[in-house]
Image (tube, grey):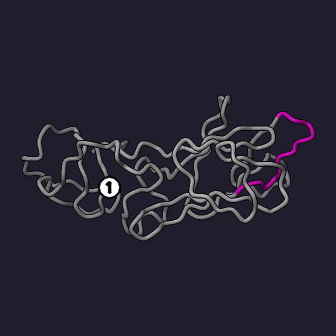
């Protein structure tokens, strides 16, 4: 069954059949323990906004959310594990000894056109919306970069949505929001 925390609005998945049980449930997000009867059952999860998590207090500053992940970047066509984003600034670039990037993409090209610091994904908490993921170029002079086949230009700062495709000169990345109902109590 899928339920919604009465305190912070986080969606949770529980192994119960009814809300009519006299037990207390601790929310893994806001850490508040509430009677199960005070939780609301969620029936239609298709209307949830993929780019935003529930407004759940200061716990988001630590990056601890459902499944302990805030979002991820996958390399399309690669068997590498997804790169996990963190709260705040995430710099994405090609793998190099001198790169300052948090997420370093290994590329096969010997003369890469992807910068060592190419993109930024800022993960910020926005009041009333939860977490929002902003994509921007690291600097104004990087080789052509596309978001969903549209060219990015500095100083663009675009809100990412689940399944957005970012095209670098030598790689395609996909932005994903993890399953917000993956926590099982």
Residue at 83% in and 48% down: 96
- Identify the residue at horizontal 20%, vertical 53% (top origin): 25
User: What stretch of residues is rendered in magenta?
Assistant: 108-119
Count the numbered circles shown.
1
Is the stretch drawn in magenta largely helix, strand or loop? loop
Tell me the quadrant of the picture where the C terminus can be found: top left
**Quarter of the figure that contains the N terminus:** top left
Quadrant in which residue 15 is drawn = top left
Query: Residue visible at 49% across and 50% down?
Result: 69
| Residue at the extreme front | 150
Left or right: where does residue 77 sit relative to residue 96?
left
Q: In the picture shown, does residue 181 fall above or below 140?
A: above
User: Which residue matches tag 1?
Assistant: 10
Residue 48 in the image: state x and y as whole percent: 36, 49
**In the displayed structure, does residue 48 sit left or right of residue 34?**
right
Judging from the image, what secondary structure is the residue with disc 1 in? loop
Horizontally, residue 183 falls left or right of residue 171, namely left
Q: What's the residue at 51%, 45% (across, down)?
A: 162
28 or 125: nearer the viewer: 125
Asked whether, in this view, residue 6 is left or right of residue 137, the answer is: left
């Amino acid at each position: 069954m899928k339920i919604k925390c009465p305190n912070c609005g986080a969606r949770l998945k529980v192994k119960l059949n009814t809300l009519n049980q006299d037990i207390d449930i601790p929310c893994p997000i806001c850490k508040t323990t509430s009677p199960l009867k005070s939780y609301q059952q969620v029936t239609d999860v298709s209307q949830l906004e993929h780019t935003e998590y529930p407004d759940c207090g200061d716990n988001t500053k630590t990056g601890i959310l459902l499944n302990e992940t805030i979002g991820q970047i996958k390399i399309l066509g690669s068997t590498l594990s997804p790169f996990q984003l963190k709260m705040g600034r995430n710099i994405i670039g090609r793998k190099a000894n001198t790169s300052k990037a948090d997420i370093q993409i290994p590329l096969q090209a010997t003369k890469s056109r992807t910068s060592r610091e190419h993109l930024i994904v800022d993960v910020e908490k926005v009041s009333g919306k939860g977490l929002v993921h902003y994509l921007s170029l690291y600097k104004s002079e990087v080789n052509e970069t596309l978001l969903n086949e549209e060219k990015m230009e500095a100083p663009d700062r675009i809100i990412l949505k689940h399944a957005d495709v970012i095209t670098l000169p030598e790689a395609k990345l996909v932005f994903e929001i993890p399953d917000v109902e993956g926590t099982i109590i």
